[in-house]
Image (tube, rainbow, N blue to C red):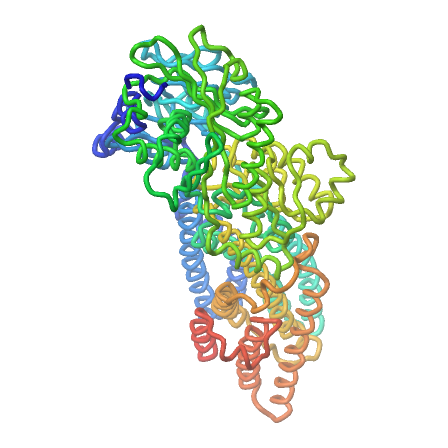
Amino acid sequence: MVGRMPTVASSQSTQAVHEPRGLTTQQASEQRKTCGYNELPTSKPRTIFQIAGNLMREPMLLLLVGCAAVYLLLGDAKEAAVLGALVVVVIGITLYQEQKTERALDALRDLSSPRALVVRDGVRVRVPGREVVEGDLLIISEGDRVPADGVLLEAVSLTTDESLLTGESVPVDKNSSAGSEAMQRPGGDGSSFIYSGTLVTGGHGIARVKAIGVQTELGRIGTSLATVQNEATLLQRDTRHIVRIVATGAIALCTVLVVAYGLLRGGWLRGFLAGLTLAMGILPEELPVILTVFLALGAWRMSKLGVLTRNMPAIETLGAATVLCVDKTGTLTLNRMSIQKLWADGNLFDAATAGSFPEQFHELAEFGLLASRTEGFDPMETGIKQFGQTQLADTEHLHRDWSHVREYPLAPGLLAMSEVWTSPAGDRLVIAAKGAPEAILDLCHTTSEVALIIGQQVNLLAQQGLRVLAVAKAYFTPVLPDHQHDFPFQFIGLLALADPVRPTVPAAVRECATAGIRVVMITGDYPATALSIARQSGLPDTGILTGAELEAMPEAELLGRLRHVNVFARAMPEQKLRLVNALKAAGEITAMTGDGVNDAPALKSANIGIAMGQRGTDVAREAADLVLIDDDFTSIVHSIRMGRRIYDNLKKAMTYVLAIHVPIAGLSVIPIFFQWPLILEPIHIAFLELIIDPACSIVFEAEPEEPDVMQRPPRALTERLFNRRTVMVSLAQGLGILCLLLAVFATALYRGQAPEDARAITFTSLVLANLALIHANRSWSRHFFTLLRSPNAAQGWGREAESFAVQD
């Protein structure tokens, strides 16, 4: 028996033999001080003078400067000085806000930057890619984006896509170094060098970093990344369109006002000042600022929930999601696997209740351990290794002196992997295989009668929610074949592992149902296992489809089945793309999770692509809109809740801004035609723009979510922020306040009060009306007086700003 041959090290020992220790933390720190960070040159941050120069081209500041110049021409130096001081204050506040926003975005970019697995102080740790230094020991595997140039010390079936550097789209094979340490140019099979920016398309390996940053091949090509500009989102384009329309109308109206003032009152210079005042009152220049603040702070708030935003449009789309397609392992479950039961030769062993480990199951545990990667971090393999090393301790079944020869990885058409070992005697090769039961049975060429008996046992274990793997063995002496099918495998038994459902998942699934969002589970597990986990998660029992059934199903039939099926089992990653496209064709707004290289097309195609932050590959993260830091399904639900809140509050803020500009514009233009004294001077509007509007924007951004935010169906993706209802509500609110203020001003004049007193009363009424308008728009579903008892962290500061404006 293999277990009695002289005995490779356990996983820990093997890692120590095959993997050098790497740098120490102190050595890495010293290298970073000497050579800098591993990053390409990016666009230089703008200086204060550059930001100030850009600000001076903003319409509101130009209008303030224009008003100050007119006051100087009129001989009113006091008013000109006040407006000039306001220009300085506005620039100071804007500089502070821009720097704060940039710091928040920089922090988010740092969080979402690619991570690298390196060996520091003899321990594998994940660090930001920019912190990799020359001499680091780099661990790479399928789906990783290589962070630096290096030479391979080990390579197991390793292939990389170097098209970024060579233009050749075919992946190239890699071999371990034969002793040459001088870096060579990329391209061609058989190289022992890897290059920054390339993609690992298969296998895994260990490399020593030779060059970072601008010293890499990618760094030598150029610095074109520094010139890349972010594309404007739908909301930004929508907002700019509205601003352009209003600005065009404002210019026309201001021209009419200047001409009317000159003809009716004869003071053309004063008429020009009145026109500038009207322009200041009409232009909704706060809209782009509000949008930027809401999206930046929204992304920051979502990062606090464990969700990183890579693409801003995802925040706009979240509230419209109708279907969540999620992985089972690690998303709905804890991704902490442990062996619960073993089955061999018709006997069942329950690890949770049984006592000592019987000899008849030793070979099954032994070959399960041999079929696992020594350096793997997969939770399933970790569970197998923990069980095997514990139960087989002090036995001849742990082979501490065997050598690893080769790995046969999982393939799309064969859900099984094999590890090849040799003993010190080297008289024959030992092959251990594990994988999906049907794949292992196929490798073993079992009879239909035996396959039926094993299949029944697999089904019994899977119905308990356990993940079932089959284990097989083979012995070989000639040259290793290219395919696993060429080995004479013998079936050994079944390993059943438990991966508990996250405790928070059932409540989150119920919340999705209440919010009109359907949860669809996609897994590569056995159908019975998938159904058991689905029931534990709270998914409705509406049937199941397997990947094979999905592949053979016509498009029309698939569209019909998708409306009812919530569980897809034995699904291959590439089949996710068909699911996404089918759901979109059925009119669903789809969010899709993924972690592997093959998941990238589906993530890119989905309305919202969500990558796993812990177990996900760099390729999946780059293709996704959102990244889950903790891989938890509950974080997705929290992000949808936050997305709906952000959109609701943004709409309230936009409605308020449009509404408050109606009375400001009306009070600027109506007195001209009624031969009344002017109500608003430029300084009044400047105070309103400088203090009240920013304060209110902060109040709306900090407004808690509506009570029914997750109790209403998703909004239509075609719904525009500035739709007819929003504009009508804004106009109704603004016209109501305008009529009230005109009545106040007219009443004051009718009672014989001086124009200055009437103006003061009207302006004070405008400030109070503005405060009421803010309060009224804080919620469109709660009563006005209920809101008085609802806290808002920023409203107190907003009230202080209002009071200051009134006193001034």
In the picture as drawn, the residue positioned furthest to the top comes out as: 478
Could you tell whether 558 is left or right of 113 in the image?
right
From this view, report whether residue 227 is shown above or below residue 420: below
Q: Which image quadrant: the C terminus?
A: bottom left
Q: Is residue 85 visible?
A: yes
Residue 544: give x, y in percent of width and height.
65, 43
From this view, report whether residue 98 is shown above or below residue 268: above
Q: Nearer the viewer, residue 459 or 580?
A: 459
Residue 95: give x, y in percent of width and height.
42, 54
Q: Which image quadrant: the N terminus?
A: top left
Q: Residue at x 51, y 26 (%)?
A: 416
Could you tell whether 219 is left or right of 786 in the image?
left
Q: Within the image, what quadrant is residue 794 found in?
A: bottom left
Residue 599: give x, y in percent of width and height.
56, 34
Q: Nearer the viewer, residue 724 or 783?
A: 783
In the picture as drawn, the residue positioned furthest to the bottom comes out as: 751
Q: Nearer the viewer, residue 113 or 227?
A: 113
Q: Is residue 232 visible?
A: no
Q: How many marks?
A: 0
From this view, report whether residue 179 is shown above or below residue 740: above
Residue 128: give x, y in percent of width and height.
37, 37
Q: Nearer the viewer, residue 226 or 159?
A: 159
Q: Residue at x 44, y 73 (%)?
A: 801
In the picture as drawn, the residue positioned furthest to the right comes out as: 556
From this view, report whether residue 505 is shown above or below residue 733: above
